[in-house]
């Protein structure tokens, strides 16, 4: 799977992307909303989970590269199946290296992922699960045309995390 935008390329990750993925997932700033950097085993599990998603669903989180500087993964963005309370939803996720924040890349990648979901999966809505402390992520969701539909608590890495469920309809 490859998606192109004006400035970005979104493509499937592979085993070779583990070092680049590790750079993102062990960054204490980028991982604030995930309760801190991942250990090596968590980085590997994250990659394996994504490869499994590609195989089972045909989509997942994709590697994001700059179109004019290919070869370096600057972030990840894509679509995953998620649960919110008792409902299964399609969620757009985005996680970028801090050096590439504040340039509109996350919104550009997430908008392409949202549009792909409506087009390819005929989905009625795309969601974003956002921790209630993650203002930058909320702003991406709002720029995607999303509004808050739900409030819920997710237990992750031993912590109860209040979340907002943002969504945009097709
Ligand atoms: C969430 C995250 C991707 C948001 O990054 P971001 O840089 O704020 O978002 P974008 O890439 O869309 O950039 C938008 C910002 O760039 C600015 N910008 C600068 N140049 C721009 C350009 N050419 N085009 C568009 N926006 C531009 C915008 O004004 C905006 O700034 P603002 O939010 O202060 O108004 C980032 O904070 C991150 O990776 N966090 C860690 C992972 C995470 O928490 N993910 C979400 C889990 S729910």
Image: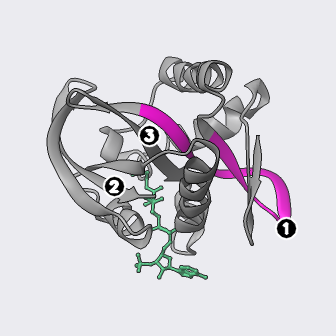
Q: What range is drawn magenta here? A: 62-81
Q: Which element type, helix, strand or loop, lies under badge 1? A: loop
Which label number is shown at residue 5? none
Q: Compared to 19, does 76 lie above or below? A: below
Q: Quadrant of residue 36?
A: top left
Q: Residues within 10 Å of mark 3 (few under 14, many from 20)?
A: many
Q: Residues within 10 Å of mark 2 (few under 14, many from 20)?
A: many
Which label number is shown at residue 68? 1
Q: Ligand 1 near label 2 (Cβ, under 8 Å)?
A: no
Q: Is residue 161 at least partly visible in the picture? A: no
Q: Compared to 15, does 90 lie above or below? A: below
Please give the residue where the numbered disc 2 appears in the rendered image.
167
In this rendering, position of residue 34 left or right of residue 11:
left
Q: Ligand 1 near label 3 (Cβ, under 8 Å)?
A: no
Residue at position x 74%, y 53% from top?
Answer: 3
Q: Nearer the viewer, residue 58 or 170?
A: 170
Q: Compared to 99, does 18 lie above or below? A: above
Please give the residue where the numbered disc 3 appears in the rendered image.
90
Could you give the CA–CA distance between mark 1 and mark 3, rounded to whole angstroms?
30 Å
């Amino acid at each position: 799977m490859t998606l192109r935008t004006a400035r970005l390329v979104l493509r499937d990750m592979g085993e070779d992307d583990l070092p680049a993925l590790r750079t993102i997932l062990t960054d204490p700033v980028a991982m604030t909303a995930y309760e801190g950097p991942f250990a090596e085993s968590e980085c590997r599990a994250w990659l394996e989970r994504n490869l499994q998603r590609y195989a089972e669903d045909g989509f997942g989180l994709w590697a994001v590269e700059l179109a004019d500087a290919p070869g370096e993964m600057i972030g990840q963005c894509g679509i995953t199946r998620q649960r919110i309370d008792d409902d299964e939803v399609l969620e757009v996720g985005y996680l970028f290296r801090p050096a590439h924040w504040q340039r509109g890349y996350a919104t550009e990648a997430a908008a392409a992922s949202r549009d792909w979901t409506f087009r390819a999966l005929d989905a009625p809505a795309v969601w974003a699960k956002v921790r209630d402390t993650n203002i930058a992520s909320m702003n991406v969701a709002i720029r995607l045309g999303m509004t808050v539909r739900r409030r819920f608590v997710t237990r992750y890495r031993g912590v109860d995390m209040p979340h907002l469920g943002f969504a945009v309809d097709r």
